[in-house]
Amino acid sequence: DEDFERRDQRYKGQQYSHLYYCRLHKFREVLGSIVQSSLPRVPVSPILGLKDGKRCVVIGTVYKQMKLKPSILDEYAKERTKPLATASSFMHSEDYLVLEDASGRVKLVGSMIVPSNYVTGIVIAAWGQGGKDGDFFVRQIIEPGLPPQSPLPSITGKPACPYLKFRDKYVALVSGLRIGSDHCNPLQIQLLVDHLTGHLGDEQEQMLSAQVVRLIVAGNSLDVQYNLLAGQAISAKDQARLTEPVKELDIVLTQVTAAMPVDIMPGANDPANFTLPQQPLHKCLFPGASAYSTFLSATNPHRFELDGIEFLGTSGQNVDDLEKYSEAKDVIELMERTLRWRHIAPTAPDTLAGCFPYTDKDPFVLDTCPHVYFCGNQKSFMSRLVTGMYIWKLVRAISIPRFCDSGTAVMVTCSDRLFVGFQHR
Amino acid sequence: MADSSSEAGIIEQLRALVSDLSLMVSYKWLSRKFFISSNVAKRLLYKFVEKYGDGLEVLYSVSGWTQSQPRSYSVKVVKLSQLEGAKALLAEGSSVHIYSIQASVPRDPALVWSPDNVQAEEFFNQPLDAVNCLRDNRFSGVSCSLVKRDHKGTVSSSAPASEKASLPQGLPPKPALMKNETSIAAKASNGETSNPSGSSKQANSTRGDKGNVSAGTVKQENGEGRRDANKRKEGSATAQGSSIANLWGRPSNNSKASPPKNGSPQKQLPGNADACINALEEHENGGSSDDDISNFRRLRRGGQKRRVVLDDEVSEHKEEEAASEEKEEEEEEEVISLISPEKKIEETKHEDKASNSNSRSGDDKRMDPKKKRKVLRTRIDERGREVTEVVWDTEEPESSKIEEIEKVKAPNKTAAPPPPPPASKHPASKASTSKASTKPSSKPGKKAACGPQQGSITSFFKKK
């Protein structure tokens, strides 16, 4: 989590160019070595050095020119020339990709390129040749691929203990509690809490609860009533209405933290900062729960390690944004793409509004591959094993459904990363 | 634990509560009210329903693994009529117990939850020193030895509370030790796991000097827990023993005909201690740095705004600034060294320009790049205008080097090495206020809400 905490960074009016530069710089090395190993005789050329017909590889950041992308300049245009787009998807058939490196830009053409699969902000290498009109005809796109992954601790290596088999550890993931909203059902949340803390069920069931070693709340735990924050003074009654959900959440968290370690991540609707990476929710919001040693207020994205297994996840903003600007058959495919691009949130700061303009690093670049990769506040529960080029790189990708809608939490076992959906009615 | 006579007493009280007051009693409410564990509460409710259940509606909780794929674990609260249906959906081994009894089931599920919530809120609102059943989860069937609560006050007695299970007699602690050692050795940083579990066995917990709240659970049980802990104290010498002993202890608990106190499995957390400890440290660090961060955020925001204005006004006000610059050049000597060399160059450039400037209402505008506190002060300057400016909270007779720094800031805004933050914020704020005061043509009647917006009307438009 330290990468995501904005410890000493200050905003001094810098622009985002530093962020992009760091990103390009980092990936250029990675891609350079990949290109060398896979296409040894093809030179890597800067974009301005492209010659007509010459076969080479260019490495750069992708920019997707989208017709329907909302732009602030539209407000000043005299006529409304842009066709209206739905709020959920800005895709258009005439989108095209432009590759930009430190020297220049070039448009990517070719049938190998399907613009809907890519988004602005990723760094790739393109192998092809310069075309006549200054375009670059692409034969193959080379992505960084999954980052190196530390090996899973092997469980079979331990001396045999007959009871260890029953002792699979589970990590519980939940998101979208949305306490304070109208359609949140407090009974459901209470059932979840009762189960996790070991009150519910008979002894067999409580054995199951005992195996849960950690709870991660992945964002959107609160539903702040924004209409009350209209800028005027808030009456005492409204103040109570604003703080009620926070208190409720604190009671819920207190009950759970008294029983197991809890990590709470901020989400898009939580009272945390807007820019990614979101900083931890302040512990003054949780006076009851923050007294416990097991309580952790985490950043979004959140990375932690348990028993040698690396977990990484977000509250869903990155994937939601990808959904708007690219096409994929499901959320897990989008997550897989972010892993292959080695970047958690490539559209930040372009369209994923709110990214802190770092000057010296890009915190979303994945240097190591997590073993479990989760994403909160999605429509439904889905999970898949994502493999890299080499079969021993495995990532369990999980999309956590919104609890207020589905009443489902997710449990991941640490032993073989199976999952279990967990339903409350 | 409740023996039969106290059980009967509780049942009688229950009858009064439910029928006379028509309360909704859930097992959890019952357990917290009468200080019994939740498993005992469930049994009591069952007995109650058998005896006096007529006329009462009962809600059952059905939990178990679903039969259909993908297999998931489902928990449902259902009425009696839906009970069979719910059970049919689940695989065998599902469990049913009474969730609550009430005179009539409300339509809104939230109303089922609300008496529990009211009770929880009562416990929650107790003073932070009090350790109550909400705060230490003492009535659940599961205990966690890692939980430590620090409310900056008194701490409950730290009896050897982490183990509740009894060691099966025949198992020597040694193999357990070995196993845990290898598992722990496999992990990278494990030095801290040994300490907490070890010390919890002795009656002092050394982990971060926090109290051992789970003492409550031991008190809840009879002395058996403590006896077990003592036994184990002799048995295993190293710290790992306690967590391993839990491992051994749990399955044997299952086999016992279980009064709930012995039927409580413990969480296995050898792998987690690190995570928790790290979490704790991060948490503590996060707290302390929050103040700094908020301070800096305030500063940052302020500095940023002012800098934008300065950009626009630099050309208009160079002369005045240059003059005042010159005046205080000597005092600025020492501060120059703190600022990057680029600023020095700019300063020499402006030395040539000379003009009379009105003295700034700026004696108070001290700048100490090292100090980081800005304070808004409103004064009437010599021209009768109200000047609100940001001054540094220090008495150092440091003149403000705002001018040259501010001009340097403008071209260097996007330069890669950022100047030291305090210095950069100082110039922005000071320059704008000085400009405002020195510009005679600025609207005298214009009251400034904050420094940079004073003075020029064009700045108003440019900013917007």
Image (cartoon, coloured by chain):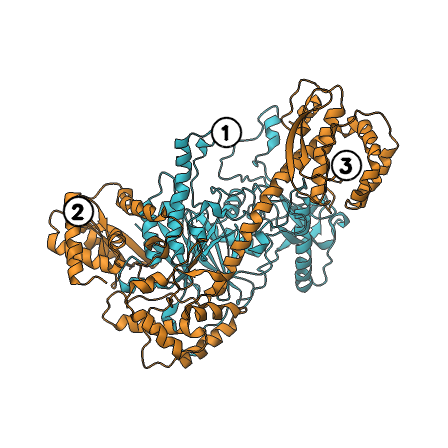
Q: Quadrant of residue B342?
A: top right
- Residue placed most toward the observer, A416 or B197: B197
Amino acid type at image mark 2: Val
- Residue placed most toward the observer, B43 or A343: B43
Amino acid type at image mark 1: Gly
Q: Is residue B397 left or right of residue A185?
A: right
- Measured from the top left, where is residue B286 in percent x and y? 55, 52
Helix or strand or loop: what does disc 3 sit on? loop
At 33% across and 62% down in the image, what residue appears?
B217
Q: Nearer the viewer, mark 3 or mark 2?
A: 3
User: Label 2: which residue?
Assistant: B18
At 44% across and 47% down in the image, what residue appears?
A286
Badge 2 sits on which subunit? B
User: Label 3: which residue?
Assistant: B399
Chain represented in orange = B
Q: Are marks 3 and 2 in contact (CB under 8 Å)?
A: no
Res B233 visible: yes
Helix or strand or loop: what does disc 1 sit on? loop
Quadrant where the C terminus of chain B sits is top right
User: Label 1: which residue?
Assistant: A231
